[in-house]
Amino acid sequence: MTPSPDFRADAGWAHAQDAADPLRTFRNEFLIPPHGDGEQTYLVGNSLGLQPRGVRQALLDEIDDWARLGVEGHLHARHPWLPYHREVRDTLAAVVGAEASEVVAMNSLTANLHLLMVSFYRPTAARPALLIERHAFPSDRDLAASQIRFHGFDPRDALIELDADEPGGTISMAAIERVLAEHGQRIALVLWPGVQYLTGQAFDLAAITRLAHAQGCSVGFDCAHAAGNLDLRLHDAGCDFAAWCSYKYLNSGPGAVAGAFVHARHAQAALPRFEGWWGRNQATRFEMRPEFDAATGAEAWQLSNPPILALAPLRASLDLFQRAGMSRLREKSRRLTAYLAWLIEAQVGDVLEVATPHEPDRRGAQLSIRVRAGRDAGKSLFDFMAAHGVLGDWREPDVMRIAPAPLYNTYADCLRYAEAVQAWRANVA
């Protein structure tokens, strides 16, 4: 067992840590779902973040301004609608480690990836291939295969899927380096996760970018499980593009508006792109010129005017991130997840094994957990915990994902998870 002498598996210790947490008041900014006479132990922010208390008023303000002002709300709402996407731009950029001009909130994750791949996946007969990981989220595989077919190539030849080479289903940097050394001259685009959805493995984006660029490949990252989770530095990583959803760690609600990043070096580049009116230069947009006068930076990839009722929850959530700071959130997240991992190893290691890498730099908040007795036992445990108010999420075939989100989860939440596993163990013994 990895020694962690400062961790203890008792409620008094956990509550003392929570009382000393400088970010403890942020939990009060969220609506915790009830369970019985108390609160649910909600450990599934990696799937859907909790609702910030400020979201309801943010939405009501926009609805009231719509009723009060009608079309004039575009200029005279409390948060004018015409430039509304810029209300979230600076804070969103800070969350993902970008310059303000490099990010935009728009569309959904897969739509954004498709739009960005129009610009950055430019296959040729000599370089048709697209590299993903073997167990990519199905949406990423679907978009990769469909993009390949759209360009007239066959995914059976042009889609390269890298298999896991480590225990638990994770992928080493050595494996990524090998596949790029072997196939790099054929690869047009590397499309990689910031955090792998099933294993919770976090990747070194800068290292992958360097390896891929050295082979002449473009590089994009799906940051669905990384945005609001890791202390990302997309600009410094040097990748060409990235996209993410905002309903997970960014707590912006089911189906929330997503985000996109385009590196500053492409701001004025003559890239192929699907274009729409809202991607035009704001200074000349309403002159209704026939020619496309592109906005600077990521905003040029916008197609339509921003969905105000979808952006309002994101604005409310990002206010919390701005106040907390990503570096402080990441510091707390490392310790919370380390405590959860220690509890699993020390208290229920005979029942559970963790697939997520042990090294803090190779994981975010999420631990992906398997029950040693197999899939049926795992599902039994998952259902038992849900019935007792401890909620994670289940991914077939046999993975339970548990993610203590630092804005609202606590040491006591992690301890309750371990106690629920112990109760299940006693129940089935």
Image (cartoon, rainbow, N blue to C red):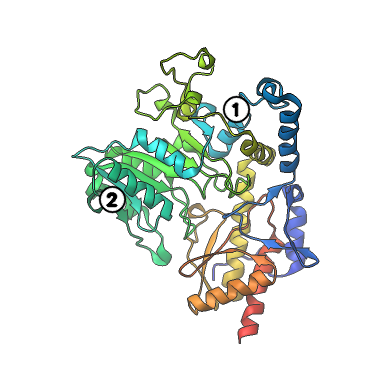
What is the quadrant of residue 62 in the picture? top right
Question: Residue 218, how many percent across, how many down?
Answer: 33, 37
Question: Residue 307, how many percent across, how many down?
Answer: 59, 34
Residue 86: image tag: 1
Q: CA distance from mark 2 to mark 1?
A: 37 Å
What is the quadrant of residue 313 in the picture? top right
Identified at 22% across, 43% down, the residue is 186
Q: Are marks 2 and 1 in contact (CB under 8 Å)?
A: no
Q: Residues within 10 Å of mark 1 (few under 14, many from 20)?
A: some
* Quarter of the image that includes the C terminus: bottom right
Q: Is residue 42 left or right of residue 248?
A: right
Front-most of residues 392 and 70: 70
Identify which amino acid the numbered label 1 is placed on. Arg
Residue 161: image tag: none
Question: Residue 422, how many percent across, how many down?
Answer: 64, 77
Identified at 32% across, 38% down, the residue is 121
Q: Measured along the vertical axis of the image, is residue 116 above or below residue 249?
A: above
Q: Measured along the vertical axis of the image, is residue 13 above or below residue 159?
A: below
Front-most of residues 25 and 378: 378
Q: Is residue 206 visible?
A: no
Q: Is residue 372 left or right of residue 218?
A: right
Q: Is residue 131 left or right of residue 25?
A: left
Q: Measured along the vertical axis of the image, is residue 302 above or below residue 183?
A: above
Look at mark 2 in the image and give the residue it sits on: 159
What is the quadrant of residue 13 in the picture? bottom right
Q: Measured along the vertical axis of the image, is residue 350 above or below residue 53?
A: below
